[in-house]
Image: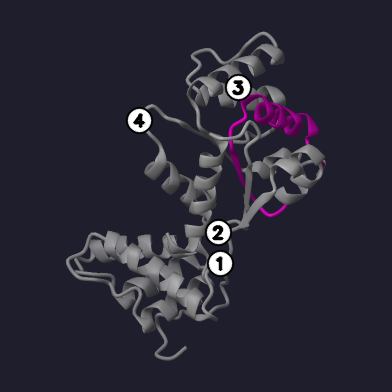
Amino acid sequence: MSNNSCLLQQIEQCRTYSKMSSSPDCMLVTGPSGSGKTHFINYYVQQHNKPQGVILNTRVPLPATVQSIAEKFLRELGEPDPQFSSIRISTDRVIELINLKVELVILDEFEGCVDPNRGRVVYEVVDWIRTIINETSLPFVLFGLNQSKNIINSNEQLKRRFSIQHELKPYSYDSAEGLNQFRELLSELDMRLPFIESSLLAEEDVSKRIYYATDGVAGPILHLVRRAAVIAMNKDHDRIERGDFAETFDYMHLINQSKLNPFLTEHL
């Protein structure tokens, strides 16, 4: 999507460069909850993965321990029995399988490397991830909440490896570029809707109301449009109508319950 074109380009550059270097660059992608991290991952894997599965897409398990993350990796890599007798054997097997069939590793929910009860970085897990990166020489793309930056900064070797950092921010309505990106997103969503007519999502009046309802955050935008589409289909509408959005907004209480429903008022 338009707002993520730079991120797409950066990941592809990492993959290309890794084929020419024994120490490829890695990336950290951060953003608040609802900023579209998981949606982007699913979109990227769907578009770029091959039938043989050259992208390893997994997430940090909770609670995060070396044993739990090693088993998580092994399951995703197709190991039929991921519970080995020792961490050393598990780690060696992860490295072997990644080197055998993976070109890119995507690790989501990296903030899970912080113990939620003690509020401290689980350094053993971070060191295990660093070991896998060093022993496979593949590009890793870590996704997490903004506090993930603190985890990277707590380890000097990881900090050097993750020199490329990208923050997923809400769409902007304050500049021509930001407005164009936001409306391009809405246009793309509109084209994917299963209606006879266009829902005119990118039209000025509709887009302004959607932005007010969601503050330009990707997750709420997608939820708003998807649920409104379901309501419209259940009513046999030919497209999403303003009343469908109004009903969706009231049901979801998007962003802030004290907000006026932007789809019920004539002027914002």
Instruction: Name the image quarter holding the N terminus.
Output: bottom left
Marks 2 and 4: CB-CB under 8 Å? no
Q: 120 left or right of 37?
A: right
Please say whether residue 121 is one of the residues in the magenta stretch: yes
Q: Amino acid at mark 4?
A: Pro
Q: Is residue 162 above or below residue 185?
A: above
Q: Amino acid at mark 3?
A: Glu
Query: Residue under circle 4?
Result: 51
Tell me the distance, in whole angstroms, between the alpha carbons under discs 4 and 3: 23 Å
Marks 2 and 1: CB-CB under 8 Å? yes
Query: Residue under circle 3?
Result: 71
Percent of width and height locating residue 148: 71, 48
Marks 3 and 2: CB-CB under 8 Å? no
Q: Is residue 99 something that shows in the picture?
A: yes
Task: Locate residue 203: give its quadrant.
Answer: bottom left
Q: Which residues are magenta?
A: 120-147
- Give the residue furthest to the top: 85
> Which mark's residue is nearer the viewer, 4 or 1?
4
Q: 30 left or right of 195?
A: right
Tell me the distance, in whole angstroms, between the alpha carbons under discs 4 and 1: 33 Å
Task: Locate residue 86: give its quadrant.
Answer: top right
Q: Residue at x 34, y 68 (%)?
A: 187
Mark 2 or mark 1: whose residue is earlier in sequence:
2
Mark 2 or mark 4: whose residue is earlier in sequence:
2
Q: Is residue 149 above or below residue 132?
A: below
Marks 4 and 3: CB-CB under 8 Å? no
Q: Residue at x 34, y 63 (%)?
A: 189
Q: State the mark number for residue 170.
A: 1
Query: Residue under circle 2?
Result: 35
